[in-house]
Image (cartoon, rainbow, N blue to C red):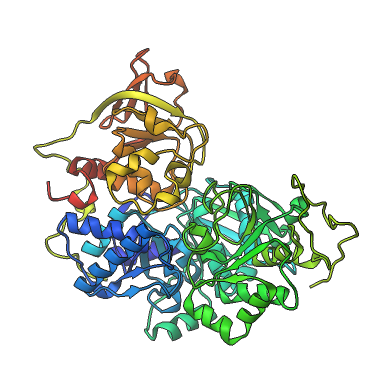
Amino acid sequence: MTIIEKIIARHSGREKVVPGEIVDVQIDVRLARDFGGANVVKNLVDNGLRIADPAKTWFTFDCNPTGSDQKYAANQQSCRIFAREHQIPVYDLNSGIGTHLAIDQGLALPGDTLVSTDSHANILGAIGCFGQGMGDRDIAAVWSRGAIWFKVPPSVKITLAGKRPDGLHAKDIVLNLLHRFGANSLLGYAVEIDGDEADRLTLDERITISSMATEMGAIALFFTPNEEILTYCYQRSGREFSPVFADPEASYEKTFTLDLAEFLPALSLPGKPHDVVPVQEVKGRKIDSVFIGSCTNGRMEDLRLAASLLKGRKVAPGVVLKIVPATDEIWNSCLEEGLLAIFKESGALVSNAGCAGCASGQVGQNGPGEVTVSTGNRNFAGKQGKGEVYLASPATAAASAIAGYITTSAEIPEIPALFGTGQAEPAQPGVNPDGGNATSSGGTETAASGTSASLESHAGDSGGKNRKPTLLEGKVWLVMEDNIDTDMIFHNCHLAITELAEMGAHAFGNLKGWEDYASRSEPGDIILTGSNFGAGSSRQQAVDCFRALGNLAIIARSFGAIYERNAINAGFPILTFDDFSPLQLKQRDRVLLDLEKSTLKNLENGIEISLNPFSPVQMQIYQAGDLLKVGNQ
C-alpha cells in the first residue's frame, strides 16, 4: 500500500484499503479555527451533539489573531465560551497557525490523522501525517463521533531527480511543481514526493511544499519522514509512535520523474497560483508592498533567510514590508536571535503570529492598485485585498522589498527604485528609474454514543417516510469556467457570516461577470460549470450560499476535493459530467436532473445524457438533510 492507504487502513480497522473505497476513518487530532470554529459550535449546539473526546479536540485562533474585526471577535468569544463549558483547549490569539502548532506542539505525529477547518491541513504531509481540511459540518461530526467518512484516493509518486541548484528554495520547488501540474491535473490524488534531494529537505522546507497541495487540487503531498523528522516529532511530543512508509511494491496510478536541475526561481502571476513564470520574466516590475509569512513561509528558516538579506539594508522608499511569523515560538526565536531588530531597522512592520495577509484578516491587506510580492500560498483575486499579488519565495520577497521592484536575491541593487510622479510605469529590469544602472550587491477511539452511525454501514439506505425528491427540475445557469475558486464564489471578507439567510447575497460576488448572480438567480436553478469548481478554501459558505438562494444542484466537470465533501455533507446535490455538449443547452433552458439514475435532460429538446453516478453515501446524506442528521431521520 501507499502512505495514505496505510494510514487510512490503520485508522479504519482494516488490513487493506484500495482507491475508491469509502470507509470510516478515526481522527487523532481535531482542530477548528476562529472563523470556522463558530460554525462548528453552531452545528453542534443546533443538533444537540456532544464532544467525543475533548483531549483530542482544539480551537486555534490564527485567521484573525488580533481580533481586529468585530465579527471575528464575536466568533472567537463564542468559541471560548463553548471551550470552557466542554473543557476544550484553546490556542488563543498569541499562539500562531494551528497546523504548525499541531506539528511543533507534538499534537500530530507521523502516521496520524488530523482534520481542521483550515484548507491547508494537508500541510501535515510534511511529517508523513494525513491532514485534511474540511468544512464545518465535517468538523462538527468529527468532534461528535471521533470519525468521519472518507473515500480512499488514488496515489501518485513524483520523484525529484538530479541535484538541487544553488539558490533554489523550497517555494521555488513547489511553484515549479504547480507550473508542471497546474491547478487540477492532480485533482483528488494523494501525492508522494520521492528522491535523494527530497529526503534532504528540512522540516521547514517540507512544510512549504506540502502546504501548497491544495493549490494543485491534491488531497495531500506526502514526504517519507527521515530520521531528523522522526527525532523532532518524538522530542516535541514525548510519545512513542509508528510512522508509515510506502511498501516497495505499492501501486501508483501515475509516476513522474522531474529534474531539479531544470527548476528555476519562480513566482506566480496575480490571480492564479498555478500561473507560474521564472522571476526573470517579470524582474523590474515596480511594487508597493511585500508580505513574508503565512503557513507556507512563516517558519524560522524563512525568516532567517529574509533577515540575511535585510541586514544592513533598508526597505525601498514607499514600499511597505510586513513580516508575520507562523507561531509565537518562532516569533520569540526571532527576538532571541536578533531578527526582529533587523526587521525593524530595515523598516518592516512585524506582527504577532498568525495567518496575516493570506487570510486578509490580520495584517497585510492591499488597497486598490497595490502591487504586492507575497510568500503566501494563494493569490486569488481579492484573497489579500485588492490590487495584484505575486507569489514568491522569502528570498525573492525580501530582495524585492529592498529593490522596490521584483528581483532575485542575487540581483539586489545598490540604489532602490523610487516612485515617480503621475501615472506609475513598471521599472525596467536592472535599471534605476531615477537614472543610473542598478548594480548587484550579491548576496483511535469509539464513536460517541447517541450520535449517528457510520456511513459505511448504512451506505445505500436512503429510505424513510419523508423522502426528498430525486427528480429536480429547474432552469440552468451555464457558468462555463474552470478553476472557479472559493474566493470567487464567496469572498473571504464575508467569512464571519454564520447565518444561512445572509449568505445567498454574496454568491459569485467575486466572480467576474457574475457579481450580480444573487439578484438574477431564482429558486430552483441548477448550475452547470467547468473543472475544479470550488478550488481553494474549506469555507462551508461557498456551498451554503447556493442553498440559501434555493439553487437545487451544481453539475461540474470536476470539483475541488474539499468543496465536494462540503456539498455532499450539506445534503446539496452535486454531480459530474464527462461531456454535456449533446444536450445543446442554452442559458436558462429548463432541465430535469434525476439523482437516482444520474441523468440530465434538456426539457427544451428532450435530449438526455448520463452523468457520473450519484453515490449511495451522497443519497443517504441528501435524504437525511445533512451529515449531522444521518441516522436520525
In the rendered image, the residue lying farthest to the top is 605
Res. 108 image quadrant = bottom left
- 448 w.r.t. 179: above or below: below
In which quadrant of the rendered view does residue 92 lie? bottom left
The vertical placement of 433 against 394, above or below, is: above
The front one of 124 and 66 is 66
Query: In terms of depth relative to the viewer, which is nearer, 1 or 542?
Result: 542
Q: Nearer the viewer, residue 516 or 418?
A: 418
Q: Residue furthest left?
A: 465
Q: Is residue 456 above or below residue 13?
A: above
Q: How many tags in the picture?
A: 0
**Residue 6 percent location from the top left of the image:** 39, 65
Which image quadrant for residue 445? bottom left
Is residue 558 or residue 379 the one in the foreground? 379
Residue 538: image location, x then y, percent: 40, 53
Find residue 35 and report its horizontal and vertical position in percent.
36, 59
Residue lying farthest right?
A: 436
Side (left or right) of 322 relative to 546 = right
Residue 161 located left or right of residue 433: left
Residue 554 x, y percent position in the rendering: 37, 35
Residue 149: in sight, yes or no?
no
Q: What residue is shown at x 13% (from left), y 64% (from top)?
A: 449
Which residue is located at x 48 percent, y 41 percent? Answer: 510
Residue 568 appears in view? yes
Q: Quadrant of the N terminus?
A: bottom left
Q: Is residue 554 left or right of residue 465?
A: right
